[in-house]
Structure formats: structure tokens, C-alpha cells
Amino acid sequence: MELDLVGKTAVVTGASRGVGLAIARQLVAEGVRVVGAARTITPELKEIGAHPVAADLSTPEGAEELGAQALAALGGVDLLVNNLGGGDDFTLNGFLATSDAQWAHSFEVNLFGTVRVTRRLLPSLLERRGSVVNVSSMSARLPGTGPIEYGAAKAALNAFGKALSEEFGPQGVRVNTVSPGPTRTGMWEDADGFGARLAEAGGVGHRDFLAGVPAAMGMSTGRMVEPAEVAAVVAFLASDRAASVTGADYVVDGGGIKTV
Ligand SMILES: NC(=O)c1ccc[n+]([C@@H]2O[C@H](COP(=O)([O-])OP(=O)(O)OC[C@H]3O[C@@H](n4cnc5c(N)ncnc54)[C@H](OP(=O)(O)O)[C@@H]3O)[C@@H](O)[C@H]2O)c1
């Protein structure tokens, strides 16, 4: 399907690796001029031809810095992909062991960073009748499957996207959510990542643990999601091919969510 994105401009947050890098790569391949933001600028982000911006988006200053640099580099923004999220400090020990600081960090990274970047760039998106895609998680609908502070922050992100779509839809800006299930990124695969720590806590080898994730999460496809599969849905929703889709939450979870 031709997405007609050639010549558009985009900002992708959390673009240095994982799902965000796949989204930036897909958009560049569609002919989009992309600004990709993260704290660390990786060689991969530079190699795909995105304009990198280093910013800590868990702070108001970082969001402001990204907004200013993106507008200076692109002249205006057609597409905003708020992929920033996850958590460096996920707890494995349940609610009683989760501190205020961990709750606050989860909401900074999974919600407030997106709120601030969106507020900064919305005037430009309105001018260009652009579109926003927020990357949430199946944990927003199944909050018991992940750390409690993560599911709660992602559920709030879904509500944010829905409300935004209603407020700005009449002015021509669409807002949608994409909710992946377990996706093959460093979060699961890195030796010191969340997946490795879960495996250790369960007394299972990392590789065996990963092999069991699809079944444990009820994924009908029998495998984890690939980052490029999330990116394809994001690119479609960002494009005018999805002109009548707004306020929606597209789940990319291999069939893990069983309800209609
Ligand atoms: N992987 C999954 O199974 C899965 C499932 C459902 C939903 N998701 C969602 O998909 C999105 C991407 O996940 P992922 O697995 O690709 O994560 P990832 O591999 O951990 O990548 C996270 C990205 O966000 C950036 N980032 C983190 N904290 C940041 C901060 N404070 N300021 C700026 N950038 C920051 C990271 O770069 P730096 O560290 O260099 O800043 C990196 O580019 C997240 O919203 C996540 O919640 C993932």
C-alpha cells in the first residue's frame, strides 16, 4: 500500500533502539524527514538517516529542547510518534515494594514526557493538520501482566490519546494509540534487561524464559512481536490512508488479549 508520506516531517521519541528505531527506520524509508530523540544517540539512529536529538524526555527541559530543535530542523511537524516509554527500574516485587520514586519515574517516562512533547508540538501539528500516534502497551488493558506502575501509566496514556483525539479532531489532527504485546527488543533480550531479571527471579535460564513468553502471554501466533511489525501499523495510522481512524487503539499483540 502506498502511504503517500514522501516529503512529510516526523518526530519519533525513544528512537535510538527497539521499537522507536524501527518506527524511525520505516518512516525514513517512506520518504519522511525524521527527527529521532533519546538520551543516547546510537550509531543505528544516525545510520538510518534520521536527524538525532539528545534529550532526557523525563524532564520538562528535555521536552522543550526536543520541541525547539525539531521545529528548527524540520520547519514544522506533520507526524508525531510518542514511542517513549518502558522503565529502567521496573520492580518485580509487587505493589508493596514499589516506591513513590518508581511510580513517579514510570509516569514521567510513560505519560508526562508524551504530554509535554505533544503540547510543545501541537501548534505545528494543527497548522499542518497532522497526526499523532502514541505507543502504549497491552498492559494498559491487562495491567496485571506487568509492573503495576507501568500498566497504570499506560492506561492513562490511552485515556490521554482518546481525549486528545476528541478535542483536536474537529481541527484536523488525528490521534491514535498502538499497543504492542511482548516485542523483541532489549527490554526482553538484553543480559541486564527486564526479561533477564524476570528469568533470574523465576530461576529459569534467560533463553528458556524468552521461549516461554508467547505461551505465558497467550499469544496465538506462538512468537513475540517484531519491532518492524509495530512500526508498520504506526506508519499506516500516521498516514492519510487512515484518515477516518482517530481515537483508536490498535493492538499488536499476537492475539494475547482475548476479549472483543
Ligand atoms: N518491548 C516490548 O515488549 C513492549 C511491549 C509493549 C509496549 N512497549 C512500548 O514500546 C515502546 C518502546 O519500547 P522498547 O521495547 O523499544 O524500549 P527500549 O528498547 O527500552 O527503548 C526505549 C527507547 O526510549 C528511550 N528512552 C528511555 N528513557 C528515555 C528518556 N528519559 N528520555 C529520552 N529517551 C528515553 C531509549 O533511549 P535512551 O535510553 O538512550 O534514552 C530508547 O530509545 C515503549 O513505550 C514501551 O512501553 C514495548
Image: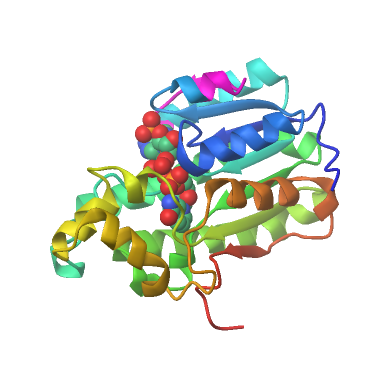
Total marks placed: 0
Residue farthest toward the bottom in the current orientation of the protein: 259
Quarter, ligand 1: top left
Q: Is 208 on the left or on the right of 235, as rendered?
A: left
Q: Residue 77 at what x, y percent from top left?
A: 71, 30
| 181 over 16 or under it: above or below | below
Residue 49 in the magenta stretch? The answer is yes
Q: Which residues are magenta?
A: 45-60
Q: Residue at x 43, y 25 (%)?
A: 55
Q: Image check: 111 left or right of 191?
A: right
Q: Which one is in front, 192 or 128?
A: 192
Which scheme is used to colour this image of the protein?
A: rainbow
- Whether residue 58 is visible to the viewer of this picture, yes or no, is no
For this orientation, the residue located farthest to the top is: 72
Quarter of the rendering occupied by the C terminus: bottom right
Task: Tell me the quarter of the picture where residue 217 sits.
Answer: bottom left
Q: Quadrant of residue 169?
A: bottom right
As drawn, is 145 to the left or to the right of 123?
A: left
Q: x, y (%) of residue 43?
A: 46, 20
Q: Is residue 215 above or below residue 195?
A: below
Query: Up-down: is 144 above or below 30?
Result: below
Q: Can you give x and y, in whole percent of width and height, for residue 161 in the image?
A: 60, 57
Report the residue at 22% width, 59% height from top. 198
Q: Position of residue 57 (x, y in %)?
A: 42, 34
Of 90 and 152, which appears nearest the observer? 90
- The residue located at (51%, 44%) in the rendering is 19
Task: Tell me if I can see residue 89 in this picture.
Answer: yes
Instruction: Give the answer, above or below, for where 226 lies relative to 77.
Output: below
Examine the image and state in which quarter residue 27 appears: top right
Residue 71 forms part of the magenta stretch:
no
